[in-house]
Image: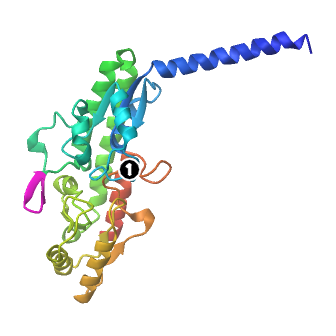
Amino acid sequence: MKKLLPLIILLLSSFLVACSKDEAAANSKENIVVTTTFINDMVSVLENNIEGYNVELLIPAGEDPHVYEPKASDLRKIDQADYVLYHGLNFEGRMADLLKEGTSITRNFETSHLTEMKEGSETMTDPHFWFDIELYKQAFTEVKEVLVKNNPSAQEQYEENYEAYIKELNELQVYVENRIDEIPQESRILITPHDAFGYLALTQDIRVHAPQGFSTDGEVSNQAIEETANIIVDNNIKSIFLETTTNPNQMKRLKEIVSSKGQDVELVNNEDDKLLSDSLAKEGNVGDSYITMYKHNIDTIVDNLK
């Protein structure tokens, strides 16, 4: 045993040194705080085989950034971050004042490429740009430039990851267009609870209507429900859809009103079939990345409208 003791001490010392080095390496990385699952996914793609930053996500998967209330721990993370990346366009509405010193990934978007939406009598810029794949590429480029600027030694790997992902996004664009083509022109009307799919309408030749408007926690007027019910009846729409971040009650009410008008409409409300709008899915679930989210949504929409 005495002969083994020096060897044991040596092995333990080596282990502790290795742990210390790993901890030191982690502590030497700069901290990036990202507000949403979309930005977190962008950073994850770019950081593949690099891991040059410690990345922290503020708004968890499944939460709605429109109405998310920042916690004390979020304030600490923002305060201690070296860099903060956020959407902008008032997407993180209740956090806007906390994010002013960060970098908006939409800061270089041209106004002419954005669409508007109404909330009551108010008109505002639609923040749900990620349903326009070209705008998503632009935001992805913005994130890449931030990472490269602050970790230039890894630029070659960042560029490699970037180019590979742009290729995937181009393939996604083709996939989406081919699937939309399966829906007869007269059936291309998407009814969802809140107004999150305007950019899909803008880029993919499909009409969208949402009785709840911009906010996911607002009340829906009787007039809005009635107007939506008439659209469904007049256009013989087969299906209406739920979203993961919205309350299902209003859409159930809408289905009942349509039924009272003598028409049946399917409410696509299985947990696995809900549309992902303001957040990616939780890790390990379908739609936990941008590309799988988009394909899930398109497949669900097409399969229920065609």
Q: Which x, y percent locates residue 305? A: 30, 70
Segment tinted magenta in the rendering: 116-124
| Residue 119 included in the magenta stretch of the image | yes
Viewer-closest of 174 and 219: 219
The residue under the point 74% across, 17% down is 12
Q: Is residue 290 above or below residue 123?
A: above
The residue under the point 37% across, 33% down is 76
Q: Which x, y percent locates residue 54? A: 44, 28
| Residue 277 included in the magenta stretch of the image | no
Q: Is residue 50 above or below residue 248?
A: above
| Residue position marked by numbered label 1 in the rendering | 280
> On the picture, is 30 further left or further right than 253?
right
Q: Quadrant of residue 78?
A: top left
> On the picture, is 162 further left or further right than 223?
right
Q: Quadrant of residue 304?
A: bottom left
Q: Amino acid at mark 1?
A: Leu
Coloration of the structure image = rainbow
- Classed neighbour count for the residue bearing mark 1: other residues with Cα under 10 Å, few (<14), some (14–19), many (≥20): many
